[in-house]
């Protein structure tokens, strides 16, 4: 059983609150702000891209989010749901879509890592920064 979060902290499993944060962040800081927040989450790691070679296409840098998600750091960023190395779904992170797509990813990552309080701290800090100005 997980402990309760301190009062005022954003719960990563609260879909509406995370959606609101992502939407406000997208409006204030654009795709770069959303990617920066995702980069700060526990379990996130940057995977460098690679240049094109003989019989090999170039790949952009990406951000791995746990074992099942990756964000291709293109313009605009693309969220990929990856299972066993196979991309099951791609979703372009356009301004109107981040609030409906990313809360599920944040909740899945939190559940996978068992890091509710750590993810909550990152989300709360982002929300407070947005509110401050």
Image: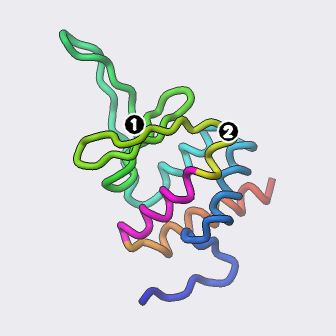
Horizontal relation, residue 18 to residue 40: left or right: right
Q: Mark 2 highlights which residue?
A: 95
Please give the range of residues in magenta: 101-113
Residue 128, numbered label = none
Tell me if label 1 and label 2 are in contact, CB under 8 Å. no
Point out the frontmost of discs 1 and 2: 2
Horizontal relation, residue 79 to residue 20: left or right: left
Residue at the top extreme?
A: 54
Q: Position of residue 71 (x, y in %)?
A: 44, 40
Residue beneath the point at 33% across and 45% down: 82
Residue at the front extreme?
A: 88
Residue beneath the point at 32% across and 19% down: 58
Residue 111: within the magenta? Answer: yes
In terms of secondary structure, where does tag 1 sit?
A: strand
In terms of secondary structure, where does tag 2 sit?
A: loop
Q: Quadrant of residue 55?
A: top left
| Main SS class of the magenta portion in the image | helix
Q: Quadrant of residue 34?
A: top right
Badge 2: residue crowd in 10 Å (few <14, some 14–19, many ≥20): some
Q: Mark 1 highlights which residue?
A: 62
Residue 59: within the magenta? Answer: no
């Amino acid at each position: 059983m997980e402990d309760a979060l301190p009062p005022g902290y954003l719960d990563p499993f609260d879909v509406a609150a995370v959606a609101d944060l992502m939407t406000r962040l997208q409006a204030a800081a654009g795709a770069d702000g959303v990617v920066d927040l995702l980069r700060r989450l526990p379990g996130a790691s940057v995977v460098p891209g690679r240049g094109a070679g003989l019989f090999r296409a170039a790949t952009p840098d990406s951000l791995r989010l746990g074992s099942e998600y990756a964000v291709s750091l293109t313009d605009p960023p693309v969220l990929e749901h990856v299972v066993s190395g196979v991309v099951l779904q791609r979703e372009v992170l356009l301004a109107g879509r981040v609030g409906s797509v990313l809360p599920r990813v944040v909740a899945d990552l939190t559940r996978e890592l068992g890091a509710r309080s750590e993810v909550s701290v990152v989300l709360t800090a982002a929300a407070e920064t947005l509110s401050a100005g």
